[in-house]
Image: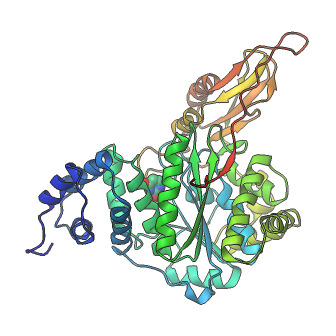
Amino acid sequence: MAATGPRPYELIRRKRDGLELSAAEIAVLVDGFVSGAVPDYQMSAFLMAVFFRGMSAAEIATLTRAMRDSGETLDLSSFGGRTADKHSTGGVGDKVSLVLAPLAAAAGLVVPMMSGRGLGHTGGTIDKLESIPGFDTALSTDAFLRQLDQIGVAMVAQSDRLAPADRRMYALRDVTATVESIPLIAASIMSKKLAEGCDNLVLDVKFGRGAFMQKMVDAEALARTMTAIGNANGVRTRALLSSMEQPLGLALGNAVEVEETIACLRGAGPADLRELTLRLGAEMMLLAGVEASREAATARLARLLDDGSALERFRGMVVAQGGDPAYVDDPQRFYRPAVTLPVVSRARGVVAGIDTLEVGLTIVALGGGRARLYEPIRHEVGVLLNRKVGDEVDAGDVLAQVLAATSAAAGEAVQRLQAAIVISGALDAAGRGGQPPAATPFILDLPQRT
Ligand code: URA
């Protein structure tokens, strides 16, 4: 920190008291944190002050840029405006990126996808990809750019060189209960996306029980904040809101999600996964200006899923990144753990709800996710749902299968899922009386402001 600049203490105090900081003052904190001049305890106090006091739009924009500028930024201008990425704020069973990245590349976009690992109850694209033996998610910048040039898609872990301030700030937020803050989440996600250098970005902002932002109103505010940051910094950005009131698809975990991805890339797989993938893909194509209407974009993407073009692109990416394509050709090869236990319905009725947060935490407890960044995970464990919200069930029906490393872990998971999958309105012998849940929207456009 410059000897003549404001002292971090002063800036923390001002934020604590709800005052607005200038761009130069925010830079003092972020740059000082990266250089070591601002210690962890002062950054932690600042983050807590932001958590309670929030930030103005100008402050969020400045914080994002300071975090972006803490490291390298990529130059993708040689791809002529055709680069497009998608980012989800995190969910359970959300393997959309795995389907969408090769699909969008098959449609002529260039997709430089940098993704995260699972954290808390949510899964991560990189963990899922690493279920494929040999798949390298740590390409050098040169190899990443070469692959984009050759096959139009590369999926890698966020490089340590991009937005290093975010990684360090996130580690502090994780242990100081300051993750769930709209300004901090928006700056964290968008600093990395701006550093990635993409021209077009579609955001899938999750709401509902399994999302970081459970309330729709908070998800909407986060979506608006991130969209504004992107558009103000030269990245054409649009957001959709999608529900995490139940997991996405039927396969939840890591290897099982890659299997479900391959099914979707073969034109099959669960309807909700295909629908969300097509909606987000169509937005990417509209933003990049390669299709004029949503209908035309959706129809083209559906064709590319059904005729095997997207699968071929996925296979090409797996080979280019050192993965074993035999797993793409024959997903039965994915290792299944020794213990498989069913979750059996105790009642006849209708599935009224699935506690997505609890399902995600159950997968973490099985070893399929992590409570702390960088913890190792088990790729083979997970949950296979047989029923979704609104489905009718009989007593004795299998609601889900647990895939676990040990009998004890499987038994515990079965108990948790039995409570997490709520059956209501027991049907009589003639099948009458079940209470279907109130329909909630699955995908929403960001509402227009009136
Ligand atoms: N994902 C991120 O990258 N950052 C956050 O703060 C939350 C989710």
Task: List x then y, in percent, for residue 364.
Answer: 52, 40
Foreground residue among 411 and 425: 425
* Left or right: 10 in relation to 427: left
Check the image and name the residue furthest to the front: 450
The residue at 80%/58% (across/down) is: 330
Determine the quadrant in which ligand 1 lies.
Answer: bottom left
Foreground: 330 or 190?
A: 190
Residue 213, position as x, y percentages in the image: 50, 44
Indicate whether 449 appears above or below 195. Answer: above
Horizontally, residue 186 falls left or right of residue 236, namely left
| Image quadrant assignment for residue 39 | bottom left
Q: Could you tell me which residue is drawn at 77 percent across and 13 percent down?
A: 426
Regarding residue 117, the answer to whether it shows in the image is: no
Instruction: Give residue 122's position: percent from left, percent from top.
Output: 54, 46
Q: Is residue 249 visible?
A: yes
Task: Give percent across and percent down for residue 87.
Answer: 57, 61
Residue 130 vertical position relative to residue 402 in the rendered view, above or below: below
Relative side of 291 to 378, left or right: right
Q: How is the image coloured?
A: rainbow
Outermost residue to the bottom: 78
Quadrant of res 429: top right
In-front residue for pair 268/209? 209
Q: Looking at the image, which is closer to me, 151 or 446?
A: 446
